[in-house]
Amino acid sequence: MNTVKKKARGRPLRSQSDVDLQAIGQRIRELRGQVTQEKFAALLRISQAQLSKYELGQSAPPLGVLAKLATSFGKTVDWILTGHSDWPGTNKAGPGD
């Protein structure tokens, strides 16, 4: 007898993802420095509440926000997502880091 697997609907749960949202949030917080969330959020053209969700690892920043962070602070999107980068002149990390 053939059985049909039920398809999962919607986005995968955070627990089903290999992305470390808390680490991404820590790197965003590092970029923010001493600037208030309100001012930093205005720079990114997002709400302070949304920035807070990114920093706490409760939500993933969209590509537009990642790109804005990278260009504004001289980092790569790879660094924001993983903590290391293969781009020359940036926070370069070797293989296995």
Image (cartoon, rainbow, N blue to C red):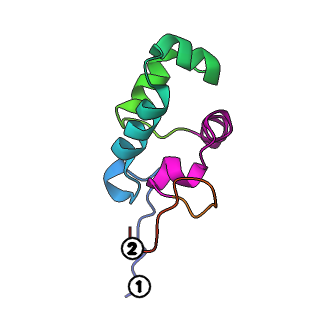
Q: Picture coordinates of residue 61 (x, y %)?
A: 53, 38
Residue pictured at 48% horizontal, 57% vertical = 84
Q: Nearer the viewer, residue 86 or 21?
A: 86
Q: Quadrant of the C terminus?
A: bottom left
| Most common SS among magenta residues | helix
Q: Secondary structure at mark 1?
A: loop
For disc 2, the marked residue is 96
Amino acid at dot 1: Asn
Quarter assignment of residue 41: top right
Q: Residue furthest front?
A: 89
Residue pictured at 66% horizontal, 33% vertical = 72
Q: Nearer the viewer, residue 9 or 30?
A: 30
Q: Nearer the viewer, residue 68 or 17?
A: 68
* Vertical order, 6 against 51 (above or below): below
From this viewpoint, is residue 9 visible? no
Which of pointers 2 and 1 lies earlier in the amino acid sequence? 1
Question: Which stretch is magenta?
Answer: 62-84
